[in-house]
Image (cartoon, helix red, strand yellow):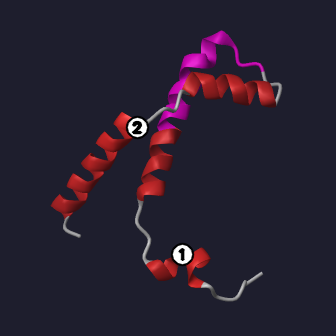
Amino acid sequence: MCITCAAAARRRRAARRERMNTFDPYAYLDAAAAAVDLPVPAAYRDGVAANLARLDAMAADVIDFPLPAPADPALAGGDDPA
């Protein structure tokens, strides 16, 4: 894929994520902190939420990365290496 095409594809994916993204970093922060009984001081909430939003964006890039068919072990049907 050419660099220009790849950049256009990234822009399209970003626009799609922006429209469809329902991730609320503050809601996730509250739920995760409650799940592990970890108090997050008010002074750190905005920074933690900003980092969670960054992680969400990075995860979306990883999820959107196309894999060739043989690279997906679930579809390859080969022997389990474990």
Identify residue for label 1: 72
Quarter of the picture containing the C terminus is bottom right
Residue 30 rendering spot, x and y as whole percentages: 68, 22
Q: Which residues are magenta?
A: 39-54
The residue lying toward the viewer, choosing from 44 and 19, is 19
Q: Quadrant of the N terminus?
A: bottom left
Q: Amino acid at mark 2?
A: Met
Residue 7, position in %: x, y? 23, 54
- Which residue in the protein does label 2 denote? 20
Percent position of residue 42, x then y: 65, 11
Q: Main secondary structure of the magenta part?
A: helix
Question: Which circle marks residue 26 in the picture?
Answer: none
What residue appears at the point 50 percent right and 48 percent down from the top-left corner? Answer: 59
Instruction: Tell me the crowding category of disc 1: few under 14, some 14 to 19, or many 20 or more residues within 10 angstroms, Cα based.
Output: few
CA distance separating discs 1 and 2 = 26 Å
User: Left or right of 38: which side holds 78?
Assistant: left
- The type of residue carrying mark 1 is Asp
Mark 2 element type: helix
Report if residue 43 lies within the magenta region.
yes
Please tell me whether residue 19 is drawn above or below residue 33 in the rendered image. below
Per the image, label 1 sits on a secondary structure element best described as loop
Which residue is located at x 55 percent, y 27 percent? 25
In the image, residue 37 sits, relative to residue 2, either above or below, namely above
- Is residue 21 found inside the magenta-colored segment of the image? no
